[in-house]
Amino acid sequence: MSRRPSCCSYLPPLYVIRFPVKILLASPRGFCAGVNMAIECLDIALQRLGSPVYVYHEIVHNTYVVESFRDKGAVFVDALEDVPEGSNLLFSAHGVSPEIRQFARERKLYAIDATCPLVTKVHLEAVRFAREGYTILLIGHDGHDEVIGTMGEAPENMILVENENDVDNLEIDESAKLAYLTQTTLSVDDANRIISRIRERFPHVHNPPKEDICYATQNRQEAIRVLAPEADLILVVGSDNSSNSQRLRELGEECGRPAYLIDGVEQLDLEWLHDVETVVISAGASAPEAIVQQCISFLEQNFDATIEVRVIRNEEVHFQLPKELRNSPDDTASAVS
Ligand code: SF4
């Protein structure tokens, strides 16, 4: 027999008993160094250059962040043909292919590059492996902005593999020089399974010099893995198109817990809290802390909530701004003109 009434009883009137809920707030969660840097870039670009500043693709994959910048004068485009010649342009955190950079130059766009350095690292590895004659297996998700950009570094040499089946179906000369790289925001477990399959089929395959799945993705996944055993429910704040947020939700489910991805507090369904004593809250690397706090306030309004911050790992990573934005406002204007 449930100790609680059905969820609609949590709504007003106020005399309804508020049941206890323990919130375990995962740390680290939310913005990573690459997202912080990209957001700061766009903020400064709008301040110094005025609107519009065009952004190729979403600056980061988060609805709230994108809408906030739209209100400030950023214009998000998926094709450079939509950017008037001579305009100010920002490349998003996910990176772009050399073809897009070249096209921007041809259109005389004043481009600022907000690509996360950890994405750039994967691009450089692709370039090096391709130059040395390797066929490169890129483990990633088809259609993701980062994958499109990385594949564009060496399209003739790269093959996308999304799962173990793709590895089984590869038709590559067993003796060919072969290397693999990965998207930065994959599930660590999924990537390891795919890499193992690649190694089984191609024992001579070369790995990247340093792991490609970034520190932020790994740390947020580790926090979910550690906290899940204590949870009756896992809430991940993040947008549907955010790869690392989706992986956190999936990981929660793989740990045997109900797990939901919510873009905003309005998506938080009290029905999920029925019979829940402990809820873990985390957030993807592109999800703002403001949304996390709104979710906590909502739970506090409806439950007798206690909050414990659980620090699984400390993060002290910062990336410097691109050179066009590092110096004074005047330097920015001259660097892009
Ligand atoms: Fe960079 Fe990782 Fe953040 Fe992506 S998730 S922007 S690769 S630090």
Image (cartoon, grey):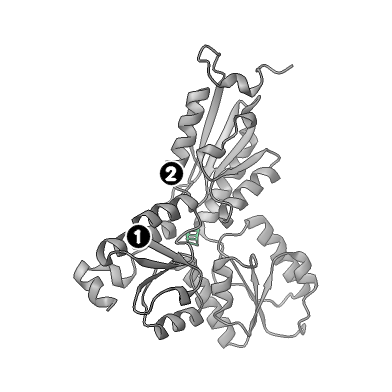
Residue positioned 43% across, 51% down in the render: 315
Residue furthest to the top in view is: 15
Residue positioned 51% across, 38% down in the render: 265
Query: Circle 1 sits on which residue?
Result: 73
Query: Circle 2 sits on which residue?
Result: 289
What is the quadrant of residue 223 in the picture?
top right
x then y, percent, for residue 95: 48, 70
| Residue 305 in view, yes or no | no
Kind of element beneath mark 2: helix
What is the quadrant of residue 328 in the picture?
bottom left
x then y, percent, for residue 320: 34, 64
Q: Cα distance, mark 2 to mark 1?
A: 22 Å
In the picture, measured across the screen, residue 58 lies left or right of residue 160, that is left
In the picture, measured across the screen, residue 276 lies left or right of residue 333, that is right
Label 2 environment density (alpha carbons within 10 Å; few <14, some 14–19, many ≥20): some
- Vertical comparison of 145 with 240: above or below: below
Q: How many marks?
A: 2
Task: Determine whether the beta carbon of the residue marked 2 sits less than 8 angstroms from the nearest atom of ligand 1.
Answer: no
The residue closer to the viewer here, 81 or 17, is 81
Kind of element beneath mark 1: loop
Label 1 environment density (alpha carbons within 10 Å; few <14, some 14–19, many ≥20): some
Contact between marks 2 and 1 (CB within 8 A): the answer is no
Residue positioned 53% across, 51% down in the render: 219
* Front tag of 2 and 1: 1
Q: Amino acid at mark 2?
A: Glu
Residue positioned 52% across, 75% down in the render: 123
- Vertical comparison of 331 with 244: above or below: below
In the picture, measured across the screen, residue 295 lies left or right of residue 54, that is right
Q: Amino acid at mark 1?
A: Gly
Of pointers 2 and 1, the one earlier in the residue sequence: 1
Q: Quadrant of the C terminus?
A: bottom left
